Amino acid sequence: MKLDELLQKKLKAEERLRRLMIGYRGVVHESAASELRHSEVKVMESYLESLTKEIEKLEKTEGKRARSLTG
């Protein structure tokens, strides 16, 4: 099911973000490595946000569908 797939992707993305945050101090002035890491963190945060929104949307529609079948 799509919801299960999204939940698995979210778990993997959360783990990746946790790993990226180890030793993360923001952008260090004139450091290409810290700028790259900062970009990776921001992309992962955005990805997690979009996954969360999609999961919430699917949960709402599945909840409505389940209620309509039982009611």
Image (cartoon, grey):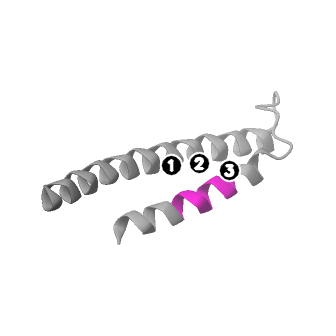
Q: Is residue 25 left or right of residue 58?
A: right
Q: CA distance from mark 1 to mark 2?
A: 5 Å
Rounded to the nearest whole Å, what is the CA distance between mark 1 and mark 3? 10 Å
Across and down, in percent, residue 18 comes to 73, 50
Left or right of 50: which side holds 58? left
Write the residue at 29% across / 48% down: 60
Residue at 78% x, 40% y is 34
Please state which amino acid type lies under the numbered disc 1.
Answer: Tyr
Instruction: Name the residue type under label 3.
Output: Leu
Q: Secondary structure at mark 2?
A: helix
Circle 1 residue: 47
Q: How many marks?
A: 3
Q: Which dot marks residue 17?
A: 3
Tags 3 and 2 touching, CB below 8 Å: yes
Rendered-image quadrant of the N terminus: bottom left
Q: Observer-nearest residue: 48 or 8? A: 8
Provide the major secondary structure of the magenta segment: helix
C-beta proximity under 8 Å, tags 1 and 2: yes
- As rendered, which of 28 and 46 lies closer to the eye? 46
- Residue on which the image places disc 2: 44
Kindly identify the residue that appears in the image at 66 percent across and 43 percent down. Answer: 41
Please tell me which of labels 3 and 2 falls first in the chain: 3
Against 45, residue 14 (above or below) is below
**Secondary structure beneath disc 1?**
helix
- Quarter residue 5 falls in: bottom left
Q: Amino acid at mark 2?
A: Met
Residue 28 colored in magenta in the image: no
Is 71 placed left or right of 16 in the picture?
left
